[in-house]
């Protein structure tokens, strides 16, 4: 399996809609929501007009010349919003590629990119039941706030 992490091309930004849907945590034995759920304003903030904001950065994971995952950030008023200086992060992989280290590689590449751009921290929101919480903690994210279902996590860069 030949894989690489690279900057996502602007022509590939429409794929962020697919990865936005893939990023929705679906508890085991629960039915997946309809794909149209990504059209609600609370989710469109992650992808709408991506690439136009000063902190819009996206990386793609390629396996055998196919994009199988993405990580992207922007400063937005989303579930992971901290302040106007901290980009919020979103990441997802197609199911067959989860648990292979690709997500960690994507995250490490994005954290390095953000640090190189001078950002001091990055945030994300994740459902407490999502197995990805452990990966985020391994990468140094800490719980900043929480509610009954989600953690708001932050990593200093």
Image (spheres, helix red, strand yellow):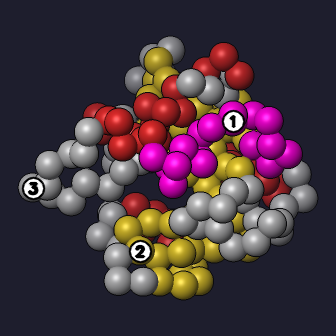
Secondary structure under badge 2? Answer: strand
Instruction: Find the magenta span and give its range.
Output: 40-56
145 to the left or right of 92:
right
Dot 1: within a 10 Å radius of its alpha carbon, few (fewer than 14), some, or many (20 or more) residues? Answer: many
The residue nearer to you, when weighing 114 against 33, is 33
Q: Is residue 114 above or below residue 83?
A: above
- Expressed as whole percent of the image width and height from the top left, the position of residue 144 reads 59, 83
The answer to which of marks 1 and 3 sits earlier in the sequence is: 3
Q: Disc 1 marks which residue?
A: 50
Q: Quadrant of the C terminus?
A: bottom right
Q: Disc 2 marks which residue?
A: 150
The answer to which of marks 1 and 2 sits earlier in the sequence is: 1
Secondary structure under badge 3? Answer: loop
Q: Quadrant of the N terminus?
A: top left
Q: Is residue 155 among what the camera can see? A: no
Is residue 48 within the magenta segment? yes
Identify the residue at horizontal 54%, vertical 65% (top origin).
79
- Expressed as whole percent of the image width and height from the top left, the position of residue 45 reads 60, 48
Q: Is residue 111 above or below residue 106?
A: below
116 to the left or right of 148:
right
23 to the left or right of 110:
left
Q: Disc 3 marks which residue?
A: 29
Dot 2: within a 10 Å radius of its alpha carbon, few (fewer than 14), some, or many (20 or more) residues? Answer: some
Identify the residue at horizontal 61%, vertical 55% (top origin).
89
Q: Is residue 153 among what the camera can see? A: yes
In front: label 1 or label 3? 1
CA gap between label 1 and label 3 equals 33 Å
The answer to which of marks 2 and 3 sits earlier in the sequence is: 3
């Amino acid at each position: 399996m030949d894989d690489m992490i690279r900057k996502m091309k602007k022509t590939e930004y429409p794929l962020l809609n697919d990865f936005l849907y893939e990023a929705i945590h679906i508890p085991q034995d629960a039915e997946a929501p309809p794909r149209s759920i990504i059209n609600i304003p609370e989710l469109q903030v992650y992808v709408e007009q991506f690439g136009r904001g000063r902190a819009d950065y996206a990386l793609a994971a390629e396996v055998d010349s196919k994009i199988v995952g993405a990580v992207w950030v922007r400063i937005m008023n989303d579930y992971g919003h901290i302040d106007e200086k901290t980009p919020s992060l979103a990441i997802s992989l197609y199911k067959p590629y989860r648990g292979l280290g690709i997500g960690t590689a994507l995250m490490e590449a994005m954290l390095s990119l953000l640090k190189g751009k001078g950002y001091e921290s990055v945030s994300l929101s994740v459902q407490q039941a999502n197995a990805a919480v452990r990966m985020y903690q391994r990468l140094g994210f800490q719980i900043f706030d929480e509610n009954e279902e989600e953690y708001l996590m932050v990593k200093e860069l």
